């Protein structure tokens, strides 16, 4: 049998590579791994279980209809992170305010986590890939003081780790601690994630563009022009490009990470700040994009440089292959 590195072994190796590492971050990531396995088990049998499919009947703070799996995933990640004791607080798409972990270990812990527990939740009922996105920071407030808003409102460049789980045809966990991006595929027969995609690199250029073109009429002029550019014939640049849009950021980004491409969720007339949330969707994906050699911007500014002002703030998002994102930005700037 070919040799296999499990996520558990990889985490230990990484920890040994940094002599001052305390093991807290390793322990935190293994709590995420545990919650991912639990959520994966439910998603796999979602079609069989009326407890999992469908809406809860209430709206979350975003004004979205909360799905049962949004709530389930939120509860499982929250419980796993609190139990491990390495996190002092958590902010989630599904929680209006941040949650303080004030148990004996939690209140002295060094890290905060921001999370989109279930990304693409409108895809659950139709058996299409969904995900989880997470972002990890060191707290700013000193240990001993209560964790506060400013611990969560840090710019993305302060992230110490970020990643996603994709519950797809295979389940994968992809993450970075700031030294490249690695992907692990879940083997359900072993109950283990195995390193399948070491040192993932976003191709500099690609031929896939991912955007909800149904909103075309509401897009800014520069985005409309970029879409037209993608659709024109030009042999030298391999156009027309291919359009691919799943409607779950994790899945759309993951495909483009492997194949090369651009993901766009721009401002629209009805969503003047875009739809995606800076803290637990755009920042972690931007960190991964940059660590894999790509770019992420709001069309003008680097995502990781934005100073957040509120937990659920939204930003327009352009992420993926470097040359494609630069090209899209040029169209935006020219039309401004
Ligand atoms: P979530 O399910 O976490 O609320 O996120 C949904 C987001 C994102 O996953 C996806 O890319 C986008 O919404 C799709 O939006 P549209 O349906 O407007 O294209
Ligand atoms: Mn949602
Ligand atoms: Mn999401
Ligand atoms: Mn979500």
Image: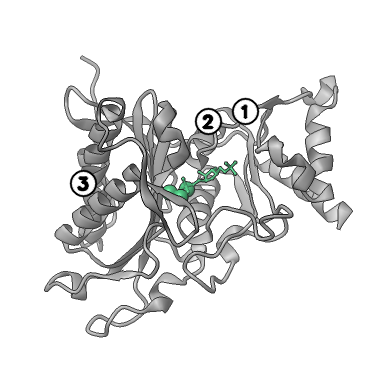
SS of the residue under disc 1: loop
Mark closer to the observer (1, 3): 1
Separation of marks 2 and 3 at Cα, in angstroms: 28 Å
Pointers 2 and 3 in contact (CB under 8 A)? Answer: no
User: Can residue 48 be seen?
Assistant: yes
Question: Callout 3: 10 Å neighbours few (<14), some, many (20+)?
Answer: few
The residue under the point 23% across, 22% down is 3
The residue under the point 62% across, 48% down is 295
Quadrant in the rendering for residue 300: bottom right
The residue under the point 21% across, 50% down is 31
Q: How many marks?
A: 3
Note whether 293 is above or below 25 in the view shown: above
Q: Residue furthest bottom?
A: 145
Question: Callout 1: 10 Å neighbours few (<14), some, many (20+)?
Answer: some
Pointers 1 and 2 in contact (CB under 8 A)? Answer: yes
* Side of 176 where 214 appears, left or right: right
Task: Pick the quarter of the image with the C terminus.
Answer: bottom right
Q: Nearer the viewer, residue 8 or 65?
A: 65
Numbered tag placed on residue 244 in the rendering? 1
Instruction: Name the residue tied to disc 2.
Output: 255
Instruction: Name the residue tied to disc 3.
Output: 12
Question: Percent position (x, y) of residue 78?
Answer: 25, 57
Q: Nearer the viewer, residue 215 or 138?
A: 215
């Amino acid at each position: 049998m070919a040799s296999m590195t499990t996520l558990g072994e990889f985490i230990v190796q990484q920890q040994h590579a940094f002599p001052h590492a305390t093991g807290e971050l390793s322990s935190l990531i293994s709590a995420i791994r545990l919650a991912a396995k639990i959520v994966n088990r439910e998603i796999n049998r979602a079609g069989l279980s009326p407890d999992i499919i469908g809406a809860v009947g209430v709206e979350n703070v975003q004004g979205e209809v909360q799905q049962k799996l949004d709530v389930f995933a939120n509860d499982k990640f929250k419980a796993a992170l609190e139990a491990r004791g390495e996190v002092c607080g958590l902010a989630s798409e599904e929680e209006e305010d941040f949650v303080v972990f004030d148990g004996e270990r939690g209140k002295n812990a060094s890290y905060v986590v921001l999370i989109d527990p279930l990304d693409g939740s409108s895809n659950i009922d139709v058996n299409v890939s969904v995900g989880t996105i997470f972002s990890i920071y060191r707290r700013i407030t000193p240990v001993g003081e209560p964790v506060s808003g400013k611990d969560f409102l840090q710019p993305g460049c302060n992230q110490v780790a970020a990643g996603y789980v994709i519950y797809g045809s295979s389940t994968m966990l992809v993450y970075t601690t700031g030294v490249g991006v690695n992907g692990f595929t879940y083997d359900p027969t072993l109950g283990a994630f195995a390193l399948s995609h070491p040192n993932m690199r976003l191709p500099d250029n690609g031929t896939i563009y991912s955007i909800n073109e149904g909103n075309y009429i509401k897009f800014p002029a520069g985005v409309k022009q970029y879409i037209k550019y993608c659709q024109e014939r030009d042999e030298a640049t391999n156009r027309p490009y291919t359009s691919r849009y799943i409607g779950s950021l994790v899945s759309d980004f993951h495909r483009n990470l492997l194949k090369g491409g651009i993901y766009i969720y721009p401002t629209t007339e009805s969503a003047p700040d875009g739809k995606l949330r800076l803290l637990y969707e755009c920042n972690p994906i931007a960190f991964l994009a940059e660590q894999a050699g790509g770019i992420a911007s709001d069309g003008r500014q680097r995502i990781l440089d934005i100073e957040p002002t509120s937990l659920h703030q939204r930003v327009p998002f352009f992420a993926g292959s470097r040359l494609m994102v630069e090209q899209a930005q040029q169209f935006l700037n020219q039309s401004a």
